[in-house]
Amino acid sequence: TTVSRMLSENQSEGFVRVRGARENNLRNVNVDVPRDAIVAFTGVSGSGKSSLAFGTIFAEAQRRFFESVAPYARRLIQQGHTPHVDEITGLPPAVALQQRRGTPSSRSSVGTVTTLSNSLRMMYSRAGIYPTDAAGRLESDSFSPNTAMGACPRCHGLGLAHTVSEESMVLDATLSIRDGAITAWPGAWQGKNLRDIVAVLGYDIDVPWKDLSRADRDWILFTEEQPVVEVVPQRDRIAKPYQGRFWSAKSFVLHTLADSKSPNVRQRVLRYVDTGPCPDCGGSGLKPEALAVTVAGQSIAALNALPMTALAEILRPIVSGNAASSEVAVTLAGDLLRRIDVLLELGLGYLALGRSTPTLSPGEMQRLRIATQLRSGLFGVIYVLDEPSAGLHPADAEPLLLVLEQLKLSGNSVFVVEHNMDVVGRADWVVDVGPRAGEGGGEVLYSGPTAGLAAVDASVTRRYLFAQDREPVARGELRHPLGWLGLTDVTRHNLQGLDAQIPLGVLTAVTGVSGSGKSTLVSQVLAEAVGQHLHPEPDDAPVLDLGDPDADIERAERPKVGAVTGLEAVDRLVQVDQKPIGRTPRSNLATYTGLFDAVRATFAATDEARARGFTASRFSFNVAGGRCETCLGEGFVAVGLLFLPGSYAPCPDCGGSRYNPDTLEVTYRGKNIAEVLGLTVDAALVFLTDVTVAARSLETLREVGLGYLRLGQPATELSGGEAQRIKLATELQRARRGHTLYLLDEPTTGLHPADVDLLLHQLGRLVDAGNTVVVVEHEMDVVAAADWVIDLGPGGGDAGGRIVAAGTPKAVSTHPTSRTAPYLKRRLA
Ligand code: ADP
Ligand code: ADP
Ligand code: ZN
Ligand code: ZN
């Protein structure tokens, strides 16, 4: 049986033996990786680390697992691919904890992914204090807004509701109804119709709105009555009398929001509603009966909103018996507390259980899942993780290592793809892949105990791993600020009345432990303040992204900023973030950077294309004509796996080439358009050297370390870091005048230290061209190379949100209490 086979393999020799691995760029790799150890997979970006750890080892373990599950259960599991490998022996089952953002669902929260919410609900159900008039104990599910039993009937558990008020629907109370006082009513004929009906009903439509009685105004705006009256149109003599139905402004708005199929119409009426916490449940999404149950005097909604550090302090007295509590309460609270303590150790104490997961960074999400695994009780499995240190301040790397250590001690193997040399240095074993990216990589340069890598000349990693080999950051002259951008009295999340000065014309690094407020300050407040200055919202601008509840939430909590000064110096804002460059396989690097336009024009200019009358659009896979119509040019077809959106399989007709056979007959220098999309950036640079515009784009892509990517690699296959570097390259290839403010959140994620050097060089180019660059960073090489540092903290959440130190790297590195200072100091000459 499978189990006994696994057991006997487990006992073999303690190694996972990989033979003949050829996934992606791997060159027939043979490697033995120890089990029951922490193993770091290292190498420059694109060298093949993930292809080995995830694409081969994890994929094979998953494939075997898939074969061993009952057929009816298979369709519930997302099947990976069959890796290109001759043989793997000694392979236990594997669990991958990747950082890819899950499907954004605003209903998933810190509490649900850690399953802490289940326990908390159980505690309220079994050990909560019920009001004396309560009918009986509630089931656990009644404390969840995500169940039919628990959801608040008004907002269906979402916690958000659209509300209307006189202020939101009547924008100018000095107007009469005839002149359009009720802004929320529709325009054109429908509006006139309603106005006529109001007149027939006996209201004065010619006095200013504000002069109508309170009762009249309330009825016209809010009534749910819908009288039908005979209307004689006054404005049009030929029109016949008709029966008109009255709609109050509120009924009209809510009805349109609920029923209109037209996004434009819905957009229009959304301007007359306030979107905020649901008035019935106060935003908790729960029914009143559930909210009336308390533990330690607080409702479950209140505990859900507390940072876990505070929640732990409430549970502690219950567990220690200091609070008069029942035996059940002690047991349940004890279980919760033990699990929360692990999260506190991982530096996540600033998060609340109710925090929705789409607002978490991928690194925070992964650490939540790592902590959850500690309790899974699994042993004898391999955990495969990508960059668990992403988003972690160096000061927080220690607790992370302890948790990885615990996973190992419970009898598991921990394989990490990692760039952070503090973590790599502490691993038991290193598998270094390289020497370079793409075709220049794909070999295992070293596999052995970490210290042994010091002797491997070909390894790029070696130069960064061993302190004695590591030079301090060679930085250029400090640049001097050309001016300052001042933000005063900033209030959002944990920033409470913060004042910040951001220097213009230099490279600034914003640092601080996880949760200290860096992203809030840079990616949200600063971005919105500058964005609003550059593009003030016109009155009729679409207000929100329809159908996206997060957009509602974001709008409900716009930052408050006092004065902003120095904005006049900035004429453009670019956020180079890690969001995907597209959500379907239809976007790729070639289309995003625009270089594909030049390639298509080149194909259209060939004799063969001209003879057939093919224009540039024939070579697009996004419009009918040249593309394969089976997959509509995607090269993939979505497979309708139950519950599993986003699974793709190659198109059966074009085999993934995206084009129809006629189009593929046209070639340029011996390659058809699909083959060109299959080239890596490095190869295309040679192949397209005569296509000047494309070559320039390709050159910048290579300069940001993306030479290994294929032109047609679908956006869905790119990592966040790769997407970010494509955006950066797209910016670099445009020669621009004026002063741009660039904001980057952790641009070094997924980058080997050698690639960090490349990135720094590119950021330097942007600054030297007269622009301002602000990066949120943990990588001390970047911080040391910056001209200015703003260190937030001292802690995360409520313990942070203040500027601890600001100044040159040197000045910040000597600050007595900054937690960044000691790490920065080590990297300065
Ligand atoms: P690393 O993890 O070291 O950054 P990867 O294993 O992700 O490197 O990539 C190694 C090589 O394989 C790169 O040239 C990359 O472009 C290529 N590659 C990665 N994923 C795919 C894929 N799904 N299809 C084809 N090539 C891929
Ligand atoms: P950093 O970037 O330094 O890790 P953040 O700016 O992400 O810190 O977070 C600062 C504080 O604001 C934390 O307490 C965090 O939980 C909170 N926070 C961040 N984003 C949100 C959000 N969308 N909703 C609620 N709280 C948030
Ligand atoms: Zn509600
Ligand atoms: Zn097709």
Image (spheres, rainbow, N blue to C red):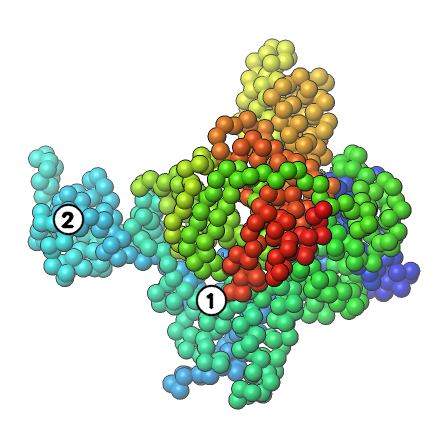
The quadrant where residue 723 appears: top right
Q: Nearer the viewer, residue 137 or 399?
A: 399
Q: CA distance from mark 2 to mark 1?
A: 43 Å
Between disc 2 and disc 1, whose residue precedes? Answer: 1
Q: Which residue is mark 2?
A: 174
Q: Secondary structure at mark 2?
A: loop
Give the residue displayed 41% in from the left and 64% down from the top: 283
Q: Nearer the viewer, residue 189 or 654?
A: 189
Q: Is residue 63 visible?
A: no
Q: Secondary structure at mark 1?
A: loop
Disc 1 CB within 8 Å of nearest ligand 3 atom: no
Q: Which residue is mark 1?
A: 145
Image: 434 above or below 450: above
Is label 2 in contact with label 1 (beta carbons under 8 Å)? no
What x and y, as percent, mark residue 341? 63, 72
The quadrant where residue 161 appears: bottom left
